[in-house]
Amino acid sequence: MAAAPGPAFGIVSEPAKPRSRFPAQIHPSAAPAKARAGTLRPQRPLAEAARDARQQDLQAQPSGLGLDSTAMRQRMIERLRADGARCEPVLRAMLAVPRHHFVDSALAAQAYEDTSLPIGLGQTISKPSVVARMLEWLHLGESARQRGDLGRVLEIGTGCGYQTALLALMASQVVTIERLRPLYESARAKLAQLQIQRCQMVYGDGMHGHGPRAPYDSIIAAAGGGELPPRWLEQLAVGGRLIAPTRAADGRGQILVVVDRSADGWRQTAGETVQFVPLKSGTS
């Protein structure tokens, strides 16, 4: 495994500052806000997710609305707004992309609830609120604010492809990497069915990023390791922003970090406690 980048990358760390759940107006180098409910758990334990699924009547649709109805997604957006979401590009993308398309049909009735769901191979699709918050923080980076979109994006961990589809609506190009072959194949099929454009899928080791398309204006990771891989930092463009979970300084749990790159180097801001699946090297 690669060593921590340390001083070689000139990273300056800053502590997190308490803010609202969704930071509607923050400085681009500001940290993610402290979650009101403690640890942010985008991937809850699979046993818990399966238990909750069994307890629900999966055939019942809220208010009789079909899952393909825009009204279902609109309800999800209204809940996100009520919780403080204000980034319109993120909300428009989440309104446009059918989340139920990316989950198992047996769990589809829960697709628009604020809950994570298992997608197989020990992985989950993150809660809508978590996805919205991370994309909002990414959109507040210097390059994104100047461009009006996320530019060229590198996504580490395609998973089921839901976040990939959202990124494709907010970026000029998305390069997404998945190390698990079954998830890669499944996500590729789902994205093709929705005719998602401006997206290049890569089956490979996300620890290495993807050099052929670098540099990237935005980098987002859906798995957390002991430290940020140096190649992610190398592949981040000047003015770009990276957001990823990583191990907390005390070695207990994970925190979310935001890295902004300037001509002078990298500035890392520590955020809230999170719980993502582990970042692993290699393919399977």
Image: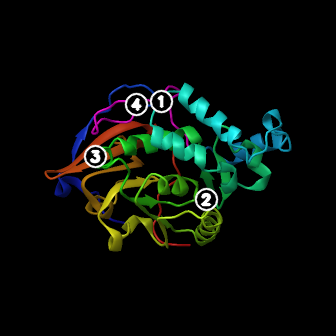
State whether residue 79 is above or below residue 150: above
Check disc 2 and report its element: helix, strand or loop. Answer: loop
The amino acid type of the residue labelled 2 equals Cys
Q: Is residue 93 left or right of residue 33?
A: right
- Residue depth check, mark 1 versus mark 2: number of the one nearer the observer: 2
- Residue depth check, mark 3 versus mark 2: number of the one nearer the observer: 3
Q: Which residue position is annotated with label 1?
A: 35
Q: Which residue position is annotated with label 4?
A: 23
Per the model, the C-alpha gap separating discs 4 and 3 is 18 Å
Name the image quarter holding residue 180: bottom right
Q: Which residue position is annotated with label 3?
A: 146
Q: Categorize mark 2 by other alpha carbons within 10 Å: few (<14), some (14-19), many (20+).
A: many
Q: Which residue position is annotated with label 2?
A: 160
Check disc 4 and report its element: helix, strand or loop. Answer: loop
Tags 3 and 2 in contact by the CB under 8 Å rule?
Answer: no
Q: Is residue 38 magenta?
A: yes
